[in-house]
Amino acid sequence: MNATTPAPRMTRQRREILEALDTRDFRSAQAWHERLRSEGSTIGLATVYRGLQSLADQGEVDAVVAESGETLYRRCEAGDEHHHHLRCRACGKAVEIDVPEFEAFAHRIAEQHSYGDIRHTIELTGVCPECTAAGKG
């Protein structure tokens, strides 16, 4: 979204989706839909997909692509602040990580090639201590 494009209005459905999300685990749109339905929501799956994508575009929700190719979502802890993730492949739990060395590298490469407005994402995946102890992953 650019500076001249207004943010989509916060509909009841978007508010329901945002309130259902937590900041710990990345989950698929289907999983978030199941959670909403189990809490009594009548929101449709297609609306959840569209709402999650819109919220991700606005920076309200983090989105990552799993090894399966499926997009996973969670509530964004950092707000508009640029950040990266270390995500458990077994349970979806994620922590935000700071990688200043990469930030400096990205800016250096951009300058070398006269690029501006550089954007990037870093997502590292592994198996968290709890899943390792449980023999998952």
Image (spheres, rainbow, N blue to C red):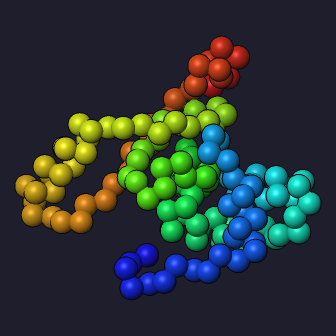
Where 29 sits versus 43, above or below? above
Q: Is residue 20 above or below residue 99?
A: below
Q: Dividing the image into 4 quarters, which one contains the C terminus?
A: top right
- Asked where in the image residue 14 lies, by quadrant, the reply is bottom right
Quadrant holding the N terminus: bottom left
Identify the residue at image location x=31%, y=59%: 119
Could you say which is closer to the camera, residue 136 or residue 42?
Answer: 42
Of 41 and 45, the residue lying toward us: 41
What percent of the width, then of the height, locates residue 69? Answer: 57, 52
Identify the residue at horizontal 48%, vertical 50% (top origin). Answer: 78
Q: Position of residue 79 (x, y in %)?
A: 49, 56
Q: In this orientation, does residue 26 appear? A: no
Q: Is residue 121 left or right of residue 133?
A: left
**Can residue 44 be seen here?**
yes
From what the image shows, is residue 11 above or below residue 103? below
Q: Residue at x 38, y 78 (%)?
A: 2
Q: Is residue 6 above or below residue 84?
A: below
Q: Is residue 55 left or right of residue 85?
A: right
| Rendering quarter of residue 61 | bottom right
Query: Picture coordinates of residue 100 (x, y %)?
Result: 27, 39
- Residue 24, picture quadrant: top right
Q: Position of residue 72 (x, y in %)?
A: 61, 52
Q: Is residue 13 left or right of residue 51?
A: right
Q: Nearer the viewer, residue 137 or 122?
A: 122
Residue lying farthest to the top in this orientation: 133
